[in-house]
């Protein structure tokens, strides 16, 4: 008891000093807090996708529940979003984003009667998410199932995109090309309003189009360092030019990205990689990040040589001297980056599968890796347990707090835990317990 008494007196003294400093100078107060190395907690919001018709489909809706970062790290805490979480408006799995400090959740409903509705919520802890601002319906511009993402501009702007395609024929009804029309909308996240919308026809090279290639899906916009270009990831598809019928087994072209002027959203061009092949649109998680070196790092998927992390330089072109192949880094084959999160200082956490992944109840087994983009190395995070039903294809969110990344681990329909990865030290902390329900899964933290 004597030691406890001394600690309380010491803390009281520290707080008295801090109080005095606050009364004298705000700057002095900040210095003292930094010197005292006191850490502020932040909200960690856990997202859970409920089963619809089949295990792991996530089509039964999305529930969220927030806890402090301290509670998220506590293995004695139990989090049960499926029992008492907040139901996010969305017919299927919601497309969620969070503010950098974790205090706000942004959502655009996906499909159904409310599809395309934008809402934002203040995070108050537990199931308490308070709607703030007005709703905005962007479906007249980008449809009821828009692909959207929050740009890294201080929580100011979101960007939603779509593409529609039409095969074109000459006067002899011979196939000539497939036209891809893209729509791009920017959304004011602060004032809940539409900022800009533009449509463009986007072409590939004449040779690529004559061979039946076209842009069939776009997603995951990101701003460049100068803030004057918007990069949009793209997926290519192909038809047989002789019949205009879709092909499945065809040569995969170099990865491509659409580049637009920003904020005007004008003057689309297409850039191509000679390092990576396959798609750059990702799926439900941010697929490209602006790093502190001024470059944008982008994952690709369906690369016949395994997923790569690609680099786009400040000149708005791919840096084909930068080669980071996940197969080589991990010593696996046919790696596929399902989702990833750049943190800082070249460090990133990657969710992936590969040719050795077991087939689970909802799809191929997933894993997490810690990567270093500077050294172009990666290592599987073995401190996280894996199960053949650990399904990461729909994974969306990685909450970042300093150098720490919070991830969820729970096989489909089974309980699991939060894990906290320190990307600088590689240390992994087993956190709060996650209570699951039949056929459902967790899709990340925000």
Image (cartoon, helix red, strand yellow):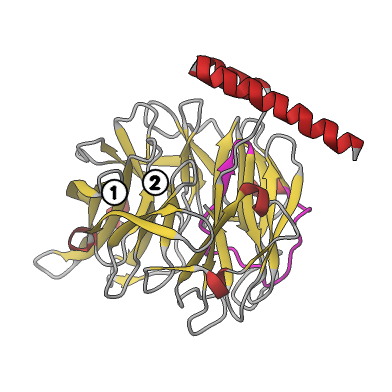
User: Measuring 74% from the left and 36% from the top, which residue is drawn there?
Assistant: 425
Question: Considering the numbered disc 2 on the image, is that residue within a helix, a strand or a loop?
Answer: strand
Residue 61 sits in quarter? bottom left
Q: Which residues lie in the magenta part? A: 380-403
Residue 319, x across and y down, in percent:
47, 31
Q: Nearer the viewer, mark 1 or mark 2?
A: 2
Question: Relative to residue 225, is residue 165 drawn left or right?
Answer: left
Magenta span has 63? Answer: no
Contact, mark 1 vs mark 2 (Cβ under 8 Å):
yes
User: Measuring 24% from the left and 64% from the top, which residue is drawn there?
Assistant: 143
Question: Considering the numbered disc 1 on the image, is that residue within a helix, a strand or a loop?
Answer: loop
Check disc 1 and report the residue beneath it: 204
Check disc 2 and report the residue beneath it: 256
- For disc 1, the neighbor class at 10 Å (few under 14, some 14 to 19, many from 20) is many
Residue 286, x across and y down, in percent:
46, 49
**Mark closer to the chain start, 1 or 2:** 1
Q: Residue furthest bottom?
A: 53
């Amino acid at each position: 008891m004597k030691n406890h008494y001394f600690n309380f007196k010491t803390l009281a003294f520290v707080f008295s000093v801090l109080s005095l400093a606050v009364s004298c100078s705000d700057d002095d107060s900040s210095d003292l807090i930094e010197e005292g190395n006191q850490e502020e907690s932040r909200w960690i919001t856990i997202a859970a996708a409920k089963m619809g018709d089949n295990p792991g489909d996530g089509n039964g809706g999305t529930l969220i529940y927030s806890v402090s970062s301290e509670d998220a790290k506590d293995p004695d805490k139990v989090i049960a979003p499926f029992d008492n979480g907040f139901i996010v408006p969305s017919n299927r799995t919601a497309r969620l984003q969070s503010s950098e400090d974790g205090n706000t959740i942004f959502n655009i409903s996906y499909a159904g009667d409310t599809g395309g509705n934008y809402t934002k919520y203040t995070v108050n802890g537990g199931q308490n998410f308070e709607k703030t601002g007005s709703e905005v319906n962007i479906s007249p511009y980008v449809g009821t199932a828009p692909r959207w993402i929050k740009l890294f501009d201080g929580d100011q702007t979101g960007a939603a995109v779509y593409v529609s395609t039409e095969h074109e024929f000459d006067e002899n009804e011979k196939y000539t090309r497939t036209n891809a029309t893209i729509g791009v909308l920017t959304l004011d996240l602060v004032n809940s309003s539409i900022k800009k919308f533009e449509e463009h026809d986007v072409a590939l090279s004449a040779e690529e189009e004559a061979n039946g290639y076209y842009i069939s899906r776009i997603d995951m916009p990101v701003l460049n360092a100068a803030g004057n270009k918007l990069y949009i990831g793209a997926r290519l598809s192909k038809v047989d030019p002789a019949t205009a019928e879709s092909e499945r087994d065809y040569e995969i072209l170099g990865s491509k990205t659409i580049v637009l002027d920003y904020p005007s959203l004008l003057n689309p061009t297409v850039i191509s990689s000679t390092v990576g092949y396959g798609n750059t649109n990702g799926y439900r998680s941010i697929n490209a990040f602006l790093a502190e070196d001024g470059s944008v790092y982008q994952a690709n998927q369906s690369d016949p040589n395994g997923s790569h992390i690609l680099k786009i330089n400040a000149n708005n072109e791919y840096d084909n001297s930068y080669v980071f192949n996940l197969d080589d880094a991990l010593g696996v084959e046919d790696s596929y980056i399902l989702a990833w999160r750049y943190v800082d200082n070249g460090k990133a956490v990657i969710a992936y599968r590969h040719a050795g992944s077991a087939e689970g109840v909802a799809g191929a087994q997933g894993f997490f890796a810690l990567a270093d983009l500077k050294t172009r190395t990666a290592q599987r995070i073995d401190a996280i347990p894996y199960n053949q039903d650990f399904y990461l294809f729909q994974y969306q969110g990685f909450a970042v707090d300093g150098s720490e990344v919070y991830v969820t681990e729970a096989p489909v329909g089974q309980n699991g835990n939060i894990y906290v990865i320190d990307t600088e030290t590689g240390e992994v902390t087993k956190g709060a317990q996650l209570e699951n329900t039949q056929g459902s899964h967790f899709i990340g933290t925000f």
